[in-house]
């Protein structure tokens, strides 16, 4: 497993060692011992999976307080642009974001620590997105930021007219108004 640092401390790209031959490929998508050896000690307790079509944008979401989550995300089918936004008020990178293309082809994973809002948009015809969390989801602790907030200036790589949002995501507050 190779770790690639991003512009935001703590947000890491993980590249597994892939064994490929004429039959296909094999890789460990998660191994607690390997992660611990690399200094990544998280107690993942919940796995989630979502299937979406081109232009579907999910996010930007986060959990607060005791329900704050570290996420380890990956794409099983297709390709997405995955985005993490630093929402820690005392952080020197507060309000900054990083975007990483994750795909079934590159098999990269993104580690999104607590204190970051997270979202992704589907770049391929369809995608299956999977992620681990180190805290259980809590409706009472959920928060979000509107994806097109001008202060954040995220290039989602999909034309605005092609973006598909849930009703909840259409009504998220701006970065300056989130809790």
Image (cartoon, rainbow, N blue to C red):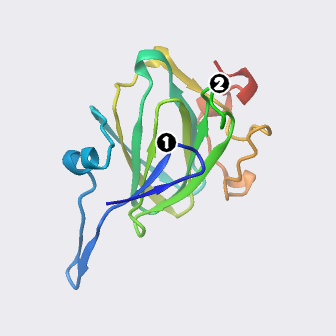
Q: Earlier in the sequence, mark 2 or mark 1?
A: 1
> Residue 9 versus residue 99: which sits nearer the camera?
9
Q: Position of residue 42 (x, y in %)?
A: 31, 35
Q: Quadrant of residue 176?
A: top right
Give the position of the N terminus as an image quadrant.
bottom left
> Of helix, strand and loop, which one carries label 1?
loop
Q: CA distance from mark 2 to mark 1?
A: 15 Å
> Of helix, strand and loop, which one carries label 2?
loop
State the residue lying farthest toward the top.
140
State the residue lying farthest toward the bottom.
22
Q: Quadrant of residue 92?
A: top right
Q: Is residue 150 left or right of residue 135?
A: right
Residue at which label 2 appears: 89
> Residue 67 versus residue 173: which sits nearer the camera?
67
Q: Residue at x 68, y 27 (%)?
A: 171
Would you say residue 174 is visible in this rendering?
Answer: no
Q: Residue at x 54, y 39 (%)?
A: 118
Badge 2, how many Cα within 10 Å: few under 14, some, many 20+? few
In the rendered image, the vertical position of residue 43 relative to residue 14, given as above or below: above
Q: Which mark is residue 10?
A: 1
Q: Is residue 5 left or right of residue 131?
A: right
Q: Position of residue 13 (x, y in %)?
A: 45, 55
């Amino acid at each position: 497993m190779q770790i690639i640092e991003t512009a935001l401390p703590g947000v890491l790209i993980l590249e597994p060692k892939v064994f490929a031959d004429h039959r296909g490929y094999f890789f460990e998508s998660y191994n607690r011992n390997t992660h611990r050896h690399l200094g990544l000690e998280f107690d993942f307790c919940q796995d989630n999976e979502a299937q979406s079509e081109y232009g579907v944008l999910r996010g930007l979401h986060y959990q607060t307080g005791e329900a704050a989550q570290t996420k380890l995300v990956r794409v099983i089918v297709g390709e997405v642009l995955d985005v993490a936004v630093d929402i820690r008020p005392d952080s020197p990178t507060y309000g900054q974001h990083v975007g990483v293309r994750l795909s079934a082809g590159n098999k990269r994973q993104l580690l999104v620590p607590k204190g970051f809002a997270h979202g992704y948009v589907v770049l391929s015809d369809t995608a299956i997105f999977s992620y681990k969390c180190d805290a259980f989801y809590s409706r009472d602790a959920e928060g979000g930021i509107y994806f097109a907030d001008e202060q954040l200036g995220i290039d989602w790589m999909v034309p605005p007219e092609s973006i598909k949002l849930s009703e909840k995501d259409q009504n998220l507050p701006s970065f300056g108004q989130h809790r």
